[in-house]
Image (spheres, rainbow, N blue to C red):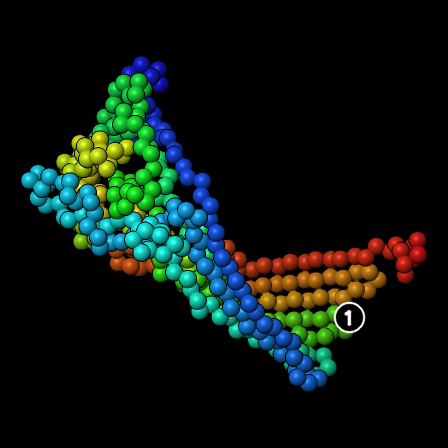
């Protein structure tokens, strides 16, 4: 009952993070540099053959932040400062705590969010060949690069969200009287790069893969265009593309396959094993203030089995695991203008397959199936009619 919850001083329901939070956010100044010199030429080789030739070079540099208030990758090998704070007499089996965020412009780290991909050179070639006076053969191939998303912009440590912790045992028992003082440990100020590898202890975050490369697409087509009577034409083409190194994300701080099998009933395990609450080795440690790791008496065996248990869920963004394949038959009939009327009718038979996400993260098996925008059949009809007014027309000429 909501009134009873109010009188007891509860906040929210018993979901640990549902009671509210306070944000202390950065307003950054970013600059990403992009250059694209290109050359293109149409060459009419002879009466029958025309070539379209081109090349383009994309230099798409990852953004920086004017005052280096930016993350650049995650160092999985450094010993985290929290390791020295653990009471090993009480937690002898806790593995050495490793891993921490890197910061742009600190300790020799570059100022931009990831490495610059210099090899985005894109040749293109197209042709049109007149087989006879009414039949033309057309085709082409080109390499294109796909602009990355703003996943580059990660400001962990420069913005911080302080959640109201309303349970010390994973939501089983709410804290009474919390309404009087919902943030007993205060609202922490972002430490910025000064926090080093201690940044965001007890929290989850995203980080950018510094070796990310710009995704690319091979586009190609081949078709025939035939002139029909009555000022009309019919065109049939095969059109396809192959996208490679598509930008993806991947959970980074997940327990191993061996541990998952102990929890997953489909693999002979028990969920109760993962959910069992164990003593919290991080309780009361100052770098964890403002998180459940600081206040909770226990943490689940699952959370303590993470490769970096001092953090929550971590996602590596700007990876290159995805791909798309598109194949289509495209048919177009066009009736050119007569008496002011022009009509175009098209039909496309296609299939689009993607590799995106993970069917089994621990076994490194990607998801493969129909793309969400796959449209096997597509028919369009369009008419344009020139109104009979004005110069050269029947009315008001």
Q: Nearer the viewer, residue 312 or 346?
A: 312
Q: Which residue is drawn at 29% across and 53% down?
A: 107
Pointer 1 residue: 231
56 left or right of 9 in image: right
Question: Residue 53's x, y, as percent?
Answer: 59, 76
Q: Which residue is drawn at 25% across and 39% down?
A: 202
Q: Nearer the viewer, residue 177 or 106?
A: 106
Please state, as top left, top right, bottom left or bottom right, where the C terminus lies in the image.
bottom right
* Circle 1 SS class: loop
Q: Residue at x 29, y 59 (%)?
A: 364
- Compared with residue 294, is residue 331 higher up or lower down, i.e. above or below? below
Q: Residue at x 41, y 37 (%)?
A: 25
Please state, as top left, top right, bottom left or bottom right, where the N terminus lies in the image.
top left
Question: Residue 30's x, y, as percent?
Answer: 46, 49
Q: Can residue 4 be seen in this view?
A: no
Q: In which quarter of the image is residue 130?
A: bottom right
Number of residues whose C-alpha sits closer than 10 Å to that of mark 1, classed few (under 14), some (14–19) or many (20 or more): few
Q: Which of 94 and 139 is in front in this view?
A: 94
Question: Residue 269's x, y, as percent?
Answer: 18, 47
- Compared with residue 259, is residue 172 higher up or lower down, i.e. above or below? above
Q: Quadrant of residue 182?
A: top left
Furthest-bottom residue in view? 46
Question: Residue 352's x, y, as percent?
Answer: 48, 61
């Amino acid at each position: 009952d909501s009134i009873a919850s109010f009188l007891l001083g509860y906040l929210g329901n018993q979901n640990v993070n549902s009671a509210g939070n306070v944000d202390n956010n950065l307003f950054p100044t970013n600059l990403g540099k992009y250059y694209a010199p290109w050359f293109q030429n149409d060459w009419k080789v002879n009466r029958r053959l025309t070539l379209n030739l081109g090349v383009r070079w994309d230099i798409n540099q990852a953004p920086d932040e004017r005052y280096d208030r930016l993350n650049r990758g995650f160092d999985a090998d450094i010993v985290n400062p929290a390791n020295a704070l653990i009471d090993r007499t009480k937690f002898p089996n806790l593995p050495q705590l490793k891993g921490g965020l890197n910061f742009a412009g600190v300790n020799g780290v570059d100022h931009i969010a990831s490495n610059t991909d210099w090899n985005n050179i894109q040749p293109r070639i197209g042709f049109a060949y007149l087989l006879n006076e009414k039949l033309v053969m057309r085709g082409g191939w080109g390499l294109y690069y796909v602009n990355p998303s703003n996943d580059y912009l990660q400001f962990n440590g420069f913005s911080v969200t302080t959640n109201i912790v309303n349970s010390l045992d994973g939501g089983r028992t709410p804290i009474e009287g919390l309404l009087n003082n919902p943030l007993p440990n205060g609202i922490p100020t972002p430490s910025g790069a000064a926090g080093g590898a201690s940044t965001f202890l007890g929290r989850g975050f995203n980080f950018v893969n510094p070796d990310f490369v710009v995704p690319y697409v091979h586009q190609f087509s081949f078709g025939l265009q035939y002139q029909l009577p009555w000022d009309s034409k019919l065109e049939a083409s095969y059109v396809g593309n192959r996208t490679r190194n598509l930008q993806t994300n991947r959970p980074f701080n997940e327990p191993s396959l061996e541990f998952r099998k102990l929890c997953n009933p489909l693999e002979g395990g028990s969920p109760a094993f993962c959910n069992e609450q164990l003593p919290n080795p991080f309780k009361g440690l100052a770098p964890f203030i403002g998180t459940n790791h600081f206040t909770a008496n226990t943490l689940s065996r699952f959370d303590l089995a993470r490769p970096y248990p001092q953090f929550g869920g971590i996602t590596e963004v700007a990876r290159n695991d995805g791909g798309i394949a598109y194949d289509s038959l495209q048919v177009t009939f066009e009736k050119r203008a007569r008496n002011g009327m022009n009509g175009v009718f098209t039909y496309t038979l296609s299939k689009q397959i993607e590799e995106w996400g993970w069917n089994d993260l621990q076994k490194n098996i990607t998801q493969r199936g129909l793309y969400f925008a796959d449209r096997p059949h597509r028919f369009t009809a369009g008419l344009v009619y020139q109104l009979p007014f004005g110069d050269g027309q029947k009315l008001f000429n």
